[in-house]
Image (cartoon, rainbow, N blue to C red):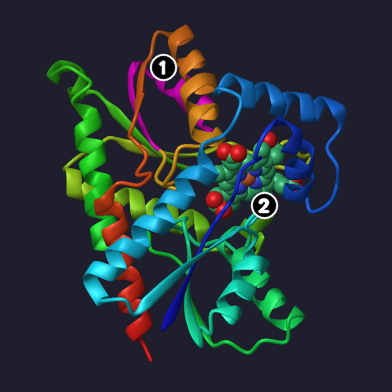
Amino acid sequence: MMGVLVMAYGSAQDPDDLLRYYTHIRHGRAPSPEQLENLRMRYEAIGGFSPLTAITQKQAAGLQEALNVMAGESFQVFLGLKHSPPFIDEAILDMARAGIERFVALVLAPHYSTMSVGEYFDEIRESLARHNLSLPWRGISSWYQNCRFIDLVAHRVLKAREKFSPDEQADLVTIFTAHSLPQTIYQKGDPYPTELRQSGELVAEACGITRYRYAWQSAGRTKEPWMGPDIVDTVRQLASEGYYHVLICPIGFVSDHLEVLYDLDIECQQVAQDLGVHMERTASFNDDPKFLEMLAHLVMETSQLE
Ligand code: FEC
C-alpha cells in the first residue's frame, strides 16, 4: 500500500484556539494583544471561524475516493496540517502504524517556495528523524504548470468573467494573486515569484485573455519588508489608470479561508467599492471532484516515478 500524505496550512479550531494558532504560525513567538485582537476581528468578520480545516478534510477524503476509483485500493491518504491538528508529525506516526512502506507527499499549494512547500517538507524530514523512521518518500514540489490544473483555473476565470457585461469584459483586468512572502526570498533565488508568473501566463493563454497582472496578498504583520505589489495597492493603481472592472484569481490558494474570505472578499472588496471598482473573484476549488481527480492523477503519476 502506498501512502499519500496530504498537507495544508490548518486553521484555528475555535476562538479559544486563536492564541495557540497564531503563536504556532509565528514559530513560537506569542503575538501582541493588539495582533491577537486583530486576528480575532478578522475571524469574526468571516463568521467566527475559518472553514479551512473542514475543507481540507473533505479534500483528503475526496482524493481518497478518486484514487480508489482510478487505482483500485492501492493508496491510503493521510492528512497532516502545518499549524493545527492533525499535525504532520501525527500523520507520519499514523502512516508508520498502518504499515505504510513509502509515500507521496502533496502540499495543497500549487507554487513552490522554501518558505511554504519547503517548510512542509522540512517538517516531514524532522518528524521521520525524531521517530527514527526510514520511510522512503517523494515530495511533489509544485504543480502550478500541470495542464489539468491550468484548465480548471482557466474554466474558473471564464466563468467569473460572465459576471461582467460584454462591454465590461472588454476592459476587464484579471489579477493573479498568491500569498506574499518576506522579500528575503528574492536574494535566495526562490522560484516562487517566477512560478506565479508562469501559472498566470498559462491560464491567460488558455482563456485567450491578454490584460492581466500579478499581485501578492495577505502579507504578514511583521517588521520585515514583504513582496509587492500588494493586491489592494494594485486595485488602487488600476483605478488610477482608468480600469474599473477587476477579476481577482487567487491562483496560489485552493480553498476558502481567512486570506480569501477576509483579505479579498471583505478588505479588498471594500477598497474597490470605495473607488467605484466592480471587483469579482474566481471561486475556490474546495472539494470540487474535478480538482480532486486532478490531484489523484498527480499522485499516481508521481508514485510511478523511479
Ligand atoms: O483560514 C485560516 O485560518 C488560515 C488562513 C491562512 C492561510 C495561509 C497561507 C499561507 N501563509 C504563508 C506564509 C505565512 C508567513 C507568515 C504568515 C502569517 C499568517 C498569519 C495568519 C495566517 N498566516 Fe499564512 N496563512 C493563513 C493565515 N503566513 C493568521 C498571522 C499574521 C497575519 O495575520 O497576517 C508570517 C509568520 C511569522 O510571523 O513569522 C511567512 C504561506 C501560505 C500559502 C501556502 C500554504 O497554504 O501553506 C506561504 C491559508
Q: Position of residue 259 (x, y in %)?
A: 54, 35
Q: Amino acid at mark 2?
A: His
Give me the residue at 45% from left, 15% from top: 272
Quarter holding residue 16: top right
Bounds of the magenta segment: 228-249
Which of 288 and 33 lies nearest the eye of the viewer?
288
Which of 188 and 89 lies nearest the eye of the viewer?
89
Give me the residue at 46% from left, 56% from top: 108
Mark sitting on residue 117: none
Which of 28 and 243 lies nearest the eye of the viewer?
28
Mark 2: C-beta under 8 Å from nearest atom of ligand 1: yes
Cα–Cα gap, marks 1 and 2: 37 Å
- Check disc 1 and report the residue beneath it: 239
Residue 272 in view, yes or no: yes
Name the outermost residue toward the left.
Answer: 166
Front position among marks 1 and 2: 2
Name the outermost residue toward the front.
Answer: 98
SS under mark 2? loop
How many other residues sit within 10 Å of disc 1, few (<14), some (14-19) or many (≥20)? some
Give me the residue at 50% from left, 14% from top: 270
Of the 4 image quadrants, the one containing the C terminus is bottom left
Task: Determine the quadrant in which ligand 1 lies.
Answer: top right
Query: Was residue 77 drawn as part of the magenta stretch in this picture?
Result: no
Give me the residue at 71% from left, 26% from top: 40
- Check disc 2 and report the residue beneath it: 83
Q: Amino acid at mark 1?
A: Ala
SS under mark 1? helix
Quarter holding residue 37: top right
Left or right of 251 on screen, residue 5: right
**Considering only order in the chain, which callout, 2 or 1, is on the residue closer to the N terminus?**
2
